Image (cartoon, helix red, strand yellow):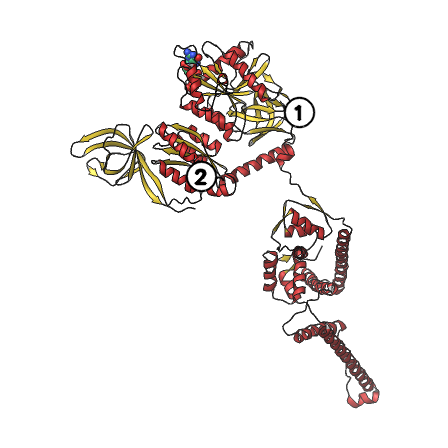
Amino acid sequence: MMIKYKVKEVATDLDVATKEVVSVLKDKLGVDKKAMTTLNEEELNFIFDYFTQKNAVSDLAPYFAVRDQAIRQKEEEAAKRKAEEKKRREEAKDQLRPDSAKKSGKVQAAPAQPKKEKVDRTADIDLKSEIKSKRGTGRIVDTGAAEVNVDRYNQKYDDLALDKVKNENNMSSKKQKINQRSKQRNRRSAKRETERERMARIEKERKAKKMTVLIPDEISVGDLALRLKATVAEVVKKAFLMGTMVTANDVVDFDTASLIAMEFHAKVEKEVVVTIEERIIDDSEDTDDNLVDRAPVVVVMGHVDHGKTSLLDYIRNAHVTDTEAGGITQHIGAYRVNINDRDITFLDTPGHEAFTTMRARGAQVTDIAILVVAADDGIMPQTVEAINHAKAAGVSVIVAINKMDKPGANPEQVKQQLTEYELIPEEWGGDTPCVPVSAKTGMGIDDLLEMVLLVADMKELKANPDRAAKGTVIEARLDKGRGPVASILVQNGTLRTGDIVVAGMAVGHVRAMTDDKGRRVKEAGPSIPVEITGLDDVPTGGDTFNAVTDERLARELVEQRKHEKKEAEFNARTKVTLDNLFDQMKLGEVKELKIIVKADVQGSVEAVRQSLEKLSNEEVRVNIIHGAVGAVNESDVMLANASNAIIVGFNVRPDANAQANAERDGVDMRMYRVIYDCIEEIESAMKGMLAPKTREVILGTAEVRDVIRIKSIGNIGGCYVKSGKIQRGAGVRVVRDGIIIADDTIGSLQRFKDSVKEVNEGYECGIGLEKYNDIKEGDIFEVFTIEEYRED
Ligand SMILES: Nc1nc2c(ncn2[C@@H]2O[C@H](COP(=O)(O)OP(=O)(O)OP(=O)(O)O)[C@@H](O)[C@H]2O)c(=O)[nH]1
């Protein structure tokens, strides 16, 4: 251990201004120190090296000349003093003789002999001042003479210690002080020994290449110096000689750091930073020998009322309740059926919402999607959405042409329509199996299930039951009696009661497990859904869960995840938007710009699709992942969120839920009235030239509840302000059933008989538009202004 020094003391000892030491520390080492703060070993070494180099003396002759002169002077003075003393003694002797004493009548005392030590120190100070005067303003820092310096510092500490002792005990005797002093000296000399020994050992180690340093991917020069047991200055010097200019705070990569370390004869080992996840979660790859077949996981999707629930119910009733005597069906988000001695797991939340929510959270749960299409209705908007969701997730699609028992059933037409969405039926040479079924009569359902097994066979779905369980939370809730309850689907490994599990931000021991038939089970293997209790918090659907071995680390991991979540929320969103598209393209994060197109008529959807796809260039491909007629809805936003897409609308508006979700998830929605504007904007965004200087700010919305016809003026809408405020002269869009039918300006605004400038939310008013007259009850006036803004 080195003795601790304050900046001020070092400055005094080096005979430089404290300010100078402070500024060197700041400039060269990047550390902020005050006069009274202590320096650590590394900093002290650096300061010594720095001032040594700064004040290096090219010629030591003047130093020795001065020293010799001082010694000579000292010798002369001593000789002189000796002579004087001798003389005085002689005189005294003379005076003590009776005759001479009588002569003078008095006795003269000899003068006190000056302390040798004192004389020496004076000489030392004189020497210093002489050197100084000879060198003008230059300073000498004695680098080679570590002994000398240390002694000087020791003297100082002796004084300090003595003062302290004096203050503490005024009564203590001089003897005691001396004892303490000598004790301290001994202790310090031991310290010096250790320090010297340490340096020698390090040097030896370096030479013998025994020193091994661990270097991570990146390391700061200061940290590297510490690990190499060297000073920053030494490391900087070696780096410089290697052609790299660095300072203490610079970060160097592993290769550079290793080269520097080798210069110090150190053996380099790569420091691998192991995350808690890596430590407690086994993510090793399974080999072919430990993999066994697993049941497929199936989701049922399709348009509203096409029979999703009926189909799921039929399958469940026909294959579960009937065969499992006494089994009480439990809703745990998924269930299993047994066909030809093989299992199929169905997620029993029909529709693509749950499916997409899970996918948006990064969970890939399903293997096969059954697309239910009513044979008497054909492909409808939500069928298209479902197709696109399934495609985006890359799952296999089996089409169940339902309601075959109905007289109007037209399966051929359904197949024909499917081809428009790149789903070519198998019998027509494509690879999409289409099975005619009836959820009412049960017709074809067994064929459908067999088809599921066939597709599953082709997919070769496998898992390893002999490892720690891993899977996805399907849904979770807080039960009053049982605490947090989570339905989970085991995707690999086997989960057992008592296992420690981490599910998203929840952790705990599996207390009890219940299967989809309400039976208590002790273990659940791959593709088996179970409901578990024992977690300390309610996880979210789509969270992954892992069985782990170390509970303490598991809890630490959860804390870390919570912290990361907070940070992620705090940090800027990385969702692609037209504003950040170019930057993301440059960073290589976006190679494909996914767009969802919604328009008022099919013609526009097609026109936009074609024009936008033509914008693809070498860096980025424009991909329209979904296009449909109608207002932008929640499902569009979910798809955009899960697929990192932007939404483009023509003459349509987002509905309230879509608006809220887009804001929450950071999905970019752009609404246009003219196709050309959209193409131009996306094109400029791709070139990084998008610089919109104005944007639309919605002021409020009003609903037309009554239409008042006034002959001389025209139609006035008797309106109720639903949100925000309405301002006279502001822009207004007339929206009827989610479609914009007019763009206009608010011409007149009245409260009772008075003409007013604005009307706030919750009030009724009369609104007349400047040009558009054909307003109808139920129309929504969306009032907006255009404001200028600057990019953040
Ligand atoms: N005739 C006939 N009717 C069916 C068939 N399948 C379903 N239905 C009827 O169609 C209607 C809608 O069925 P659901 O199963 O509720 O449809 P869904 O797709 O789940 O509807 P949402 O849950 O609203 O999305 C119900 O009245 C069913 O009885 C079928 O195969 N034949």
Residue 321, visible in the rendered structure: yes
In the figure, 653 relative to 134: above or below?
A: above
Of 223 and 786, the residue lying toward us:
786
Give the amino acid type for the residue marked by disc 1 in the picture. Asp
Residues 646 and 525: in front is: 646
Task: Say which quarter of the image contains residue 687.
Answer: top left
Q: Quadrant of residue 414?
A: top left
Q: Which corner quadrant holds the N terminus?
A: bottom right
- What residue occupies the far bottom of the structure in this picture? 103
**At which x and y percent is residue 562?**
54, 36
311 shown above or below 18 = above
Q: Position of residue 721 (x, y in %)?
A: 29, 34
Q: Secondary structure at mark 1?
A: helix
Residue holding disc 1: 288
Tell whether circle 2 marks a residue whose Cβ is less than 8 angstroms from ligand 1: no
Residue position for label 2 = 577
